[in-house]
Amino acid sequence: HTPMYFFLLNLALLDLGAISTTVPKSMANSLRDTRHISYIGCVLQVFFLVFLMSAEYFLLTTMSYDRYVAICRPLHYETLLGSRVCVHMAAAALTCGVLYALLHTANTFSLPLCQGNAVDQFFCEIPQILKLSCSTSYLRELWLIVLSACLFFVCFVLIVVSYVQIFRAVLRIPSQLGRYKAFATCLPHLAVVSLFVSTLIPAYVKPSSISSPSLDLVLAVLYSVVPPAVNPLIYSLRNQELKDALRKIIPGCLQKQ
């Protein structure tokens, strides 16, 4: 019931939703040896993927503020991050994600498709859909790209500023054990943010000159499948109770084998 675990619950739900948006349909098509997806299904896939991934990024920004308050202002933690404040912050992240996804989805599927209807990807991805649009109509997406870049940059700056303050506060802690404990509470979040950013940026800012179907596929898997699958593991490994349970289970399984 603490703020950190409340945000982790929301992050886990977003990860579960993100990976469920693309992987089950891809697996079903693979088993049926087809690549078919309905138009409505494609629209919903784009909307939910953009919503869940953008909401996750906004939530990670919120979680950096949670870590800042926990490390830099621990005596005011309960006051600044009460239950009502946490609910409002999570709701704001989800609301921004919904609005952002609505803008992108409505604008993408209002474009006329002049290059057929075969998306060269294992899910409906906006860059691949834009390749099917008429040569001039994709320019309507430019203003949304600028908006996306601004939002991404603002959130990134907020995360960086939070961690600069955190590192400054931690380095002032006199005991080595105290510094280690403080860093340990922040490293999982920092690892998740780094994984999210490092897999998403190459997929959307790579030059078109180096684009190829195989590279696009690899990058799509990296940002749409890897973070949602790895994030629970990253956060679980810092939970001492879970680690103790794994130490008991794994030797037992090995003995049975």
Image (tube, rainbow, N blue to C red):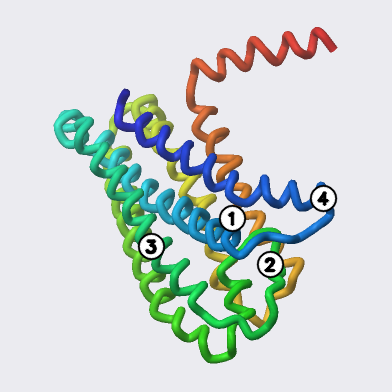
| Residue type at numbered disc 4 | Arg
Residue placed at 35% from the left, 55% from the top? 160
Distance from the alpha carbon under mark 4 to that under mark 3: 34 Å
Q: Nearer the viewer, mark 1 or mark 3?
A: 3
- The residue under the point 43% across, 32% down is 184
The CA span between labels 1 and 4 is 25 Å
Relative to 174, 27 lies left or right: right
Q: Give the mark nearer the N terminus: 4 vs 3.
A: 4
Label 1 close to label 3 by CB (< 8 Å): no
Badge 2 vs badge 3, beta-carbon distance below 8 Å: no
Mark drawn on residue 32:
4
The percent coordinates of residue 251 (x first, y second) are 72, 11
- Give the SS element for disc 4: helix
Q: Considering the numbered disc 1 on the image, is that residue within a helix, a strand or a loop?
A: helix
Quadrant, the C terminus:
top right
Q: Residues within 10 Å of mark 3 (few under 14, many from 20)?
A: many
